[in-house]
Image (tube, rainbow, N blue to C red):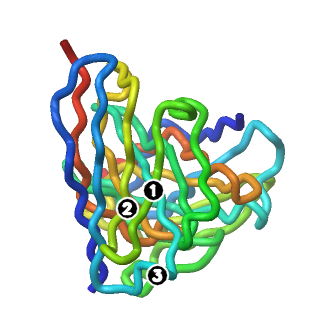
Amino acid sequence: EVQLVESGGDLVQPGGSLRLSCTASGFTFNTYSMNWVRQAPGRGLEWISYISSGSTTKYYGDSVKGRFTVSRDNAKNSLYLQLDGLRAEDTAIYYCARRTWFDSWGQGTLVTVSS
Amino acid sequence: QAVVTQEPSLTVSPGGTVTLTCDSTTGAVTSDHHCSWFQQKPGQAPRTLIYDTNNRYSWTPARFSGSLLGGKAALTLSGAQPEDEAEYYCLLSYSGTYWVFGGGTKLTVL
């Protein structure tokens, strides 16, 4: 069974940093591209980042470009998102989702940016 | 960057049929946008229903179908059930370099 489990969400002050993790199981992680998607409270879904299976290609949404960095460690079946320069509008549940079909999702981890 | 629009809300009667649409500000939605559709219920993560315009997953009820309709992507629900009440999101791919979700359609089964 495919499983994705996010972790690392927390309360952080504006301008702060955080590193999110997504641990995968039930499939051959190193053969799949991955994405990060977020959802602000009461709002819709927003795609924020993509990384290819071998980390050679990375894409970001305009709202996070230059502030967030996606990476992965295939030996650890893990996907990461480094969040720097956090703003109040980054407050959201952050999900990881598998491949360009977004066929499997984790349950999400909550990031709250507030002083 | 593109903006993807959906109907904010729709209502369907139990057993009825409803079509949700997904439009792009960049022009007609085509198979090259590889549209996906997601269902999300309150407090839950999204669940993928349709991928690449018209393909169901093994877990997708047969009453859901995807298509292209009049320059938009469409999700048709035939024979609505009470458990289909949820928020529905479409997702379009733009040259495989960025993806944009629609704003979501709140579907009421009443």
Q: Is residue A30 above or below residue A51?
A: below
Decide if residue B90 is on the left or right side of residue A78: right
Decide if residue A17 is on the left or right side of residue B17: left
Q: Chain of mark 1?
A: A
Compare residues B88 and A2 and report the one nearer the observer: A2
Q: Residue at x 30, y 61 (%)?
A: A22
Q: Residue at x 75, y 36 (%)?
A: B25
* Type of the residue with mark 2: Leu
Q: Secondary structure at mark 1?
A: strand
Q: Which residue is mark 1?
A: A71
Residue A79's disc is 2
Q: Chain of mark 3?
A: B
* Type of the residue with mark 3: Tyr
Q: Residue at x 63, y 74 (%)?
A: B54
Q: In x, y percent, where is residue B78?
A: 48, 70
* Type of the residue with mark 1: Ser
Q: Secondary structure at mark 2?
A: strand
Which comes before the other along the chain, label 1 or label 2? 1
Q: In x, y percent, where is residue A104?
A: 38, 70
Q: Is residue B83 above or below residue A9?
A: below
Residue at the far right in the pictured view: B27
Q: In x, y percent, where is residue B85?
A: 31, 55
Quick check: can you spot residue B27?
A: yes
Q: Are marks 3 and 1 on the same chain?
A: no
> Where, quadrant-wise, is the N terminus of chain A in this rendering?
bottom left
Look at the numbered discs 1 and 2 and tell me whether their residues touch, using CB distance below 8 Å. Answer: yes
Q: Which residue is mark 3?
A: B57
Dot in front, 3 or 1? 1
Real-space CA distance between mark 3 and mark 1, rounded to the nearest whole angstrom = 28 Å
Q: Residue at x 40, y 74 (%)?
A: A74
Q: In x, y percent, where is residue B4?
A: 64, 41
